[in-house]
Amino acid sequence: MAKTMAKLKTQSKKTSGNKKKMSAKKTAVKAKAKARPKQTFNVSHHREVDFLADGLRTYARYRDLGMSKATGGLLQAHVIRMVPPCDPAVVSKRHFHDVDLQMIYVLNGWIKGEYDGEVMTMHKGAAWLQPPRIKHTVLDYSEDCELLEIIVPAEFKTVELA
């Protein structure tokens, strides 16, 4: 009986210690959540006039979805409409983006690229994650190519390579 009581006390201490650790983790998570930039509700309805030539590349039109402003710079989201025809002399410049996260989803058409030596063609419905600073080159795209791109953080550098 004494052994059983001692065992129960030991288990109780372990459980209590685990509860304290879990409580500390929850407090840390809550503190981290409070550090996020203020976010506001945002809606971006499709309008053809919103596809602008003021983005990163001359061979694309960008529709800013307003997420950078709504998230206090936490992320950027835009629809990219590639301008046909694809001209490899203009398009195929090796580069990387200094980001924390970059996700692309093909809304329409297809795009072919080279990512750290691997050539891939992504078709409508494909999604991919480009790890931070992955060296890549756009090789070709269809006349109807449209992409959704989400990038963290909203402001980032693109570095063109020789």
Image (tube, rainbow, N blue to C red):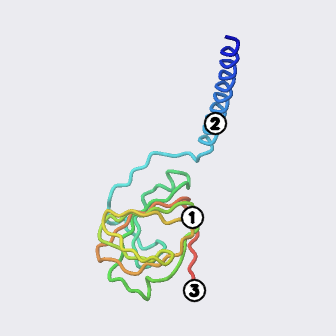
Which amino acid type is shown beneath numbered disc 1?
A: Val
Q: Which residue is mark 2?
A: 25
Q: Position of residue 152 (x, y in %)?
A: 53, 59
Which amino acid type is shown beneath numbered disc 2?
A: Lys
Question: Could you tell me which secondary element the residue under label 1 belongs to?
Answer: loop
Marks 1/2: CA distance? 28 Å
Residue at left offset 49%, top offset 83% = 93
Residue at left offset 36%, top offset 83% = 86
Q: Position of residue 51 (x, y in %)?
A: 37, 68
Nearer the observer, 61 or 89: 89
Residue 101 as seen in the image, left or right of residue 20: left
Question: Could you tell me which secondary element the residue under label 3 belongs to?
Answer: loop
Relative to 113, is 47 above or below? above
**Are discs 3 and 1 less than 8 Å apart at CB?**
no
Residue at left offset 58%, top offset 76% = 159
**Which one is earlier in the sequence, the residue at label 2 or at label 3?**
2
Marks 2/3: CA distance? 46 Å
**Which one is earlier in the sequence, the residue at label 1 or at label 2?**
2
Residue 87 quadrant = bottom left
Q: Residues within 10 Å of mark 2 (few under 14, many from 20)?
A: few
Residue 15 as seen in the image, left or right of residue 105: right
In front: label 1 or label 2: 2
Residue 162: assigned label: 3
Question: Could you tell me which secondary element the residue under label 2 belongs to?
Answer: helix
Q: Position of residue 96 (x, y in %)?
A: 54, 73
Q: Which residue is mark 1?
A: 99
Which amino acid type is shown beneath numbered disc 3?
A: Ala
Q: If the image is split into quadrants, where does the N terminus sit?
A: top right
Residue at left offset 51%, top offset 75% = 116
